[in-house]
Amino acid sequence: MLKLAMAGGERTFMTGYCVKCKTKDQEMKDVEVVQTKKGGWMGKGKCTVCGCGMCKMMSKDQADQAKEELTK
């Protein structure tokens, strides 16, 4: 689910599972939306706690919404 939140003064809007922290719904920073080789959509970012790389699979609608939020 995409949501707007504040993490350490920067705007984050995507949460995911951090493998290193083993925490669900961990906020991501430096998020970018990319299309996979097979045509799916994915949000890539870094964990706000440990800095580990994270990703979240998304639908086309969620990707469009995320791109719109990134351009604001």
Image (cartoon, rainbow, N blue to C red):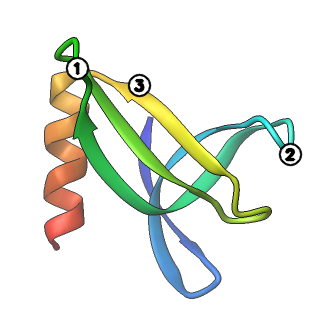
Q: Is residue 1 depicted above or below 2 in this figure?
A: above
Local secondary structure at mark 1? loop
The residue carrying pointer 2 sits among few (fewer than 14), some (14 to 19) or many (20 or more) residues within 10 Å by Cα, namely: few
- The residue carrying mark 1 is 37
Q: Quadrant of the N terminus?
A: top left
**Mark 1 touching mark 3, by CB under 8 A?**
no
Of tags 1 and 3, the one toward the viewer is 1
Local secondary structure at mark 3? strand
Residue 47, quarter of picture: bottom right
Q: Separation of disc 3 and disc 2 at Cα?
A: 19 Å
Name the disc covering residue 57, or none.
3
Q: Residue at x 19, y 44 (%)?
A: 65
Q: Separation of disc 1 and disc 2 at Cα?
A: 28 Å
Local secondary structure at mark 2? loop
Of tags 1 and 2, the one toward the viewer is 1
- The residue carrying mark 2 is 21
Residue farthest top in this picture: 38
Looking at the image, is mark 3 or mark 2 earlier in the sequence?
2
- Looking at numbered disc 2 in the image, what kind of residue is underneath it? Cys
- Looking at numbered disc 3 in the image, what kind of residue is underneath it? Met
21 or 14: nearer the viewer? 21
33 or 11: nearer the viewer? 33
